Structure formats: C-alpha cells, structure tokens
C-alpha cells in the first residue's frame, strides 16, 4: 500500500510526540505550506496567467506563467471558490503525485474541512491504483489570506484507453457524452476518441453482467478495483455517487474503478442533506428511520449490476471485513494512539479555526468545532456498525 506525504508526516509527528511529549519537537515539520497566487485580473472560467510562490519549511519556490481558473460545479456556488492550476510541465508540487494540473479544493460545504481528506487517504490504502494525493495548504490570493484549501493532483488516469465520469444530467457543449445501449449509463468521456470501440466494449460488458456469470464478468471488469471503489463510495456515502463525480477507466479491454473523488458532501453532512430523502433513508411513505448512516445508497449503475452476482457480493462483504482496521482507525483509537480524525484535529485545528473565521458556514449554528468533529466521528461509527449488520459481519 502506498502512503502519501501528508499521511507520512502525520505518523512521523505522532512518533515524535510519543517519544518527546512536546509539540515543539515537530516545529521543523511544515504540515501546512502556504501558497501565494498573484494575478492581474479576476479569476474566472477561462485560464488566466498567475505567478505562484510556495512556502514550505521557511523556503520559497517560485513559478511564473502558471494558468489558473475556477473549477467545480456545485462547490463553486459557495463564496469560497475552488481553483485549478496548470503548470507548463509535469511537476511534483509539495510532494504530491507528478502532474501538470493541480486542484485547490475549497471544502466550502464541509464544516470540518476533513471529509475529502479522509476519503482520499483511505483510498490510497486500497486497490485503487490511481487515487489522488492531497495536502492542506493556506491560500493567499493577491496577498490576501483566502482560507485553508486541500491541494490535490489532477483526477486522471494518463495511461488509460478511456477515462470516464458517470454523469446523468450535466450537459456541457464542450464535453463528449456517451450512453450505453442496454442500461443507458451515461458517461462524460474525458479521454478516448473512438466511440464505436467504446460502444462495442460496453455491449460486451453489459452482456456479461446480464449473464451473471462471474468468470465472464471478470474478463471485462477488474473486480479488485471495482469492489474497493464501491466500498469507498458506500461507506462514506457520497451524495454524488449516483449522479456525477464517479470515475472509471478502460484499459486493455477491461473496466476499472477510477480515482475516488468529491466527498465534501458525504458522511452525513447535515446541510443540504434535507434535500435528499433517499440519502436520509426516507421513502415516499415516510416510514424509514431518517438516519443518514443507514441504508445502502451507492448500489446503483455498474455497482448495482455487479452486486447482483452472488460471488461478487460475497467478495464485497469479505473485503469490507478485511478493511475494518483501516475503517475503524478513522474514528476510534483501538489500533492507534490517536484516531485519524483526532490526528487531523491536533495538527490542523489552528488552520481550520483561522479558515472558519472568514468562511463561517451559514448553516452551522451554535456549534463548536468539537461538536462538528464529534458528529463526524459518531456518524462514521454508526455507518460502519450499520453496514456490518447489513453484511452479517461479526467484528470485535
């Protein structure tokens, strides 16, 4: 399993604390670099040029003629905007995966600023080979502090034949869309030009899925990545998993789960969850519990068809049991001195608080930072317990 720099720094910091018992021992580790972006005009949907200074460990690295624009769909509606950076060549910015493009994720809807980070770090310890790397940074736009952001590399699979995003409703004139023949799955085709070849592949995949034959399905589907991809979506209960931001790629005539992405609306985030009855386990008769940590939610589209195959469903259950130490480490201290959430809180609370002074979410009323963290930890615990019960897994 691969561990990216942010996770390594957290573990190193924990070790130092255990041995030295003093936060001063980690002062030389810059857990929250600063990025200064200076532009001559307002940032919009079209790339404009910017100069960027990156400060880490008291050193500065300067990049000239970097392109920047707004990114995102739902998240750009919030006042704290997300951005895309485009460099002239592939670089490893702040130790992240090498890329020409990087995202500055605003986490505008997430009062803890943790949900995306938790999901990305978890994905990097699974069978998803192209998970994004991420790191917290403080952003300054034209020398004005603009909040705490999550810097990530580009969501992409560079060596794929096709890179696809499941997309049921968005229709942008500059994008290419494709609909499968049997199940009417609609994809935004981000990479790959031969749509006839793509149609031929999905015809074969859909026939395989209709057969419910495990061996035939395995010929066209990488089940290791797809099972982990589904578990990540289902456990964190990503709002968008049935609509958008759900990625797949096709390579050598086989489909894989793509990078897990976009979890700021997930993990029981209470606003705007009242708009999603299914998410809150409420049907049209109103006779469900109303608890968002209950019910299966992401068992639709490709994942829904895969789960109809008994052998694949058994593999999902077995894999969910195998992942229990990683899942439980997020919210408990059974295997670690500090849960992952507690680690993030310890090292980044100052930056979270600084961010929330200027970007206080309108829907968070009379809640302390600790209240928000406790809600998140409790939700993740209850979600895991519900899924263990649903899968009839005894885990102690």
Image: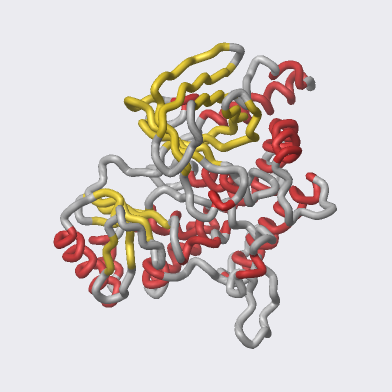
Q: Residue at x 40, y 43 (%)?
A: 155
Q: Position of residue 115 (x, y in %)?
A: 61, 48
In this picture, is 242 found above or below 159?
below
Q: Residue furthest right?
A: 366
Given residues 371 and 252, the one toward you in this image is 371
187, above or below 150, in the image: below
Position of residue 265 in the picture relative to residue 188 (left or right) = right
Judging depth in this view, the residue of 259 and 324 nearest the camera is: 259
Residue ID at (72%, 16%): 25
Find residue 316 and report its horizontal and vertical position in percent: 46, 62
Depth check: 307 or 214 in front? 307
Residue furthest to the bottom = 285
Q: Quadrant of residue 48?
A: top left
Measured as percent of width and height from the top left, residue 355 is found at 70, 36
Q: Nearer the viewer, residue 336 or 94?
A: 94
Q: State left or right for residue 251 relative to residue 392.
A: left
Quarter of the picture containing the C terminus is bottom right
Question: Residue at the top extreme?
Answer: 59
Figure check: 165 above or below 63: below
Left or right of 213? Residue 78 is right
Quadrant in which residue 65 is drawn: top left
Query: From what the image shows, is residue 182 above or below residue 261?
Result: below
Percent of width and height locating residue 165: 36, 56
- Number of disc labels: 0
In percent of the image, x 50 and y 58: which residue is there? Answer: 233
Picture residue at 53% right of the left edge, 42% below the top: 82
């Amino acid at each position: 399993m691969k561990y990216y720099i942010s996770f390594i720094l957290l573990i190193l910091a924990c070790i130092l604390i255990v041995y030295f018992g003093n936060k001063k021992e980690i002062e030389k580790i810059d857990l929250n670099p600063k990025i200064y972006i200076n532009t001559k005009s307002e940032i919009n949907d079209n790339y404009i040029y910017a100069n960027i200074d990156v400060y880490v460990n008291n050193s500065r690295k300067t990049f000239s003629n970097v392109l920047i624009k707004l990114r995102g769909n739902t998240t750009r509606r919030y006042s704290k905007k997300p951005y895309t950076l485009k460099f002239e060549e592939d670089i490893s910015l702040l130790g992240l995966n090498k890329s020409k493009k990087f995202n500055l994720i605003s986490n505008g809807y997430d009062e803890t600023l943790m949900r995306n980070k938790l999901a990305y770090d978890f994905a990097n310890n699974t069978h998803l080979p192209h998970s994004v790397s991420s790191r917290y940074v403080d952003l300054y736009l034209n020398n004005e502090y603009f909040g705490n952001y999550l810097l990530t590399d580009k969501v992409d699979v560079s060596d794929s034949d096709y890179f696809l995003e499941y997309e049921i409703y968005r229709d942008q004139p500059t994008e290419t869309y494709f609909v499968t023949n049997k199940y009417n799955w609609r994809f935004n085709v981000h990479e790959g030009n031969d749509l006839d070849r793509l149609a031929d592949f999905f015809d074969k995949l859909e026939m395989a899925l209709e057969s419910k034959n495990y061996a035939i399905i395995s010929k066209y589907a990488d089940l290791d990545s797809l099972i982990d991809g589904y578990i990540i979506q289902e456990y964190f209960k990503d709002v968008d998993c049935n609509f958008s931001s759900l990625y797949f790629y096709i390579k050598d005539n086989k489909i894989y789960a793509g990078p897990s992405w976009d979890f700021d609306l997930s993990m029981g985030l209470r606003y705007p969850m009242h708009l999603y009855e299914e998410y809150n386990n409420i049907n049209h008769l109103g006779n469900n519990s109303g608890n968002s940590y209950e019910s299966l939610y992401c068992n639709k589209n490709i994942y829904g068809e895969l789960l109809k195959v008994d052998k694949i469903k058994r593999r999902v259950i077995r894999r969910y049991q195998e992942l229990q130490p990683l899942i439980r480490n997020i919210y408990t201290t059974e295997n670690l001195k500090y849960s992952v959430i507690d680690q993030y809180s310890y090292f980044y609370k100052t930056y979270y608080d600084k961010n929330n002074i200027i970007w206080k979410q309108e829907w968070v009323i009379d809640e302390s930072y600790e209240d928000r963290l406790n809600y998140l930890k409790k939700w993740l615990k209850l979600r895991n317990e519900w899924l263990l019960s649903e899968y009839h897994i005894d885990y102690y």
